[in-house]
Image (tube, grey):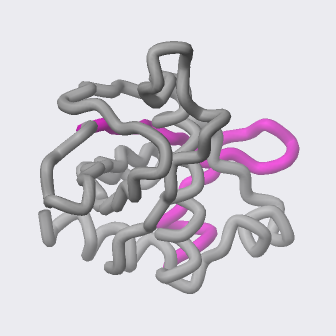
């Protein structure tokens, strides 16, 4: 999968000139949307089919600072997947290849009615893709 590229915006930095920590979580969402687009399962197609995938947990380990206008490359991979729960891993690097942040997000799958969706039953093609990607780790 191709890494998502984000250029640090001036407004994303704090008074010290470093990227504010909360922005990394926003970038994870941008990268996640890009990741699913590459899989052929865009977030808009999820929603069109009545599927929602909320974040249920996030963890970030900040390794190196970034500043305006650094480029940050965000590689997304499937760390774990079990029918109703998905854990994604994010590795963020700068132009020199230095890891600036390592993070994970966990998601469940629910229908618009709020009930848990079992992906293997209702979306077998997506289940196959996520299963294959979780085995590739």
Rendered view: 42 above or below 96: below
Task: Please give left or right for residue 135 compared with residue 84 in the image.
Answer: left
* Total numbered labels: 0
Q: Residue at image x 34%, y 61%?
A: 73
Rendered view: 73 above or below 109: below
Rendered view: 122 above or below 22: below
Work out whether residue 57 can be spotted: no
Work out whether residue 77 can be spotted: yes
Judge by depth and name the residue closer to the eye, 34 or 52: 34
Residue 18 lies, in percent from the top left, at: 42, 26
Task: Please give left or right for residue 71 compared with residue 42 in the image.
Answer: left
Rendered view: 50 above or below 11: below
Judge by depth and name the residue closer to the eye, 9 or 77: 9
Q: Is residue 121 magenta?
A: yes
Judge by depth and name the residue closer to the eye, 53 or 122: 53
Read off the magenta span.
102-124
Q: Residue at image x 15%, y 59%?
A: 96
Q: Is residue 32 magenta?
A: no
Quadrant of the rendering where the N terminus is positioned: bottom left
Quadrant of the rendering where the C terminus is positioned: bottom left
Residue 98 lies, in percent from the top left, at: 13, 49
Q: Based on the displayed image, in which of its 4 quarters is residue 16 positioned?
A: top left
Task: Please give left or right for residue 43 compared with residue 103 in the image.
Answer: right
Q: Residue at image x 50%, y 75%?
A: 126
Residue 128 lies, in percent from the top left, at: 38, 78
Q: Residue at image x 46%, y 30%?
A: 19
């Amino acid at each position: 999968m191709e890494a998502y590229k984000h250029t640090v915006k001036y407004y994303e930095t704090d008074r010290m000139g470093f990227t504010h920590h909360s922005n990394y979580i926003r970038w994870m969402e941008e990268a996640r949307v890009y990741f699913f687009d590459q899989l052929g399962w865009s977030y808009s197609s999820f929603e069109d089919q009545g599927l929602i995938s909320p974040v249920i947990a996030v963890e970030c380990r900040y390794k190196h600072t970034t500043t305006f206008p650094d480029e940050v490359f965000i590689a997304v991979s499937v760390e774990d997947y079990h029918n109703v729960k998905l854990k994604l891993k994010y590795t963020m690097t700068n132009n020199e290849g230095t890891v600036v942040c390592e993070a994970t997000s966990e998601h469940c799958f629910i229908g618009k009615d709020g009930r848990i969706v079992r992906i293997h039953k209702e979306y077998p093609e997506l289940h196959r893709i996520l299963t294959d990607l979780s085995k590739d780790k």
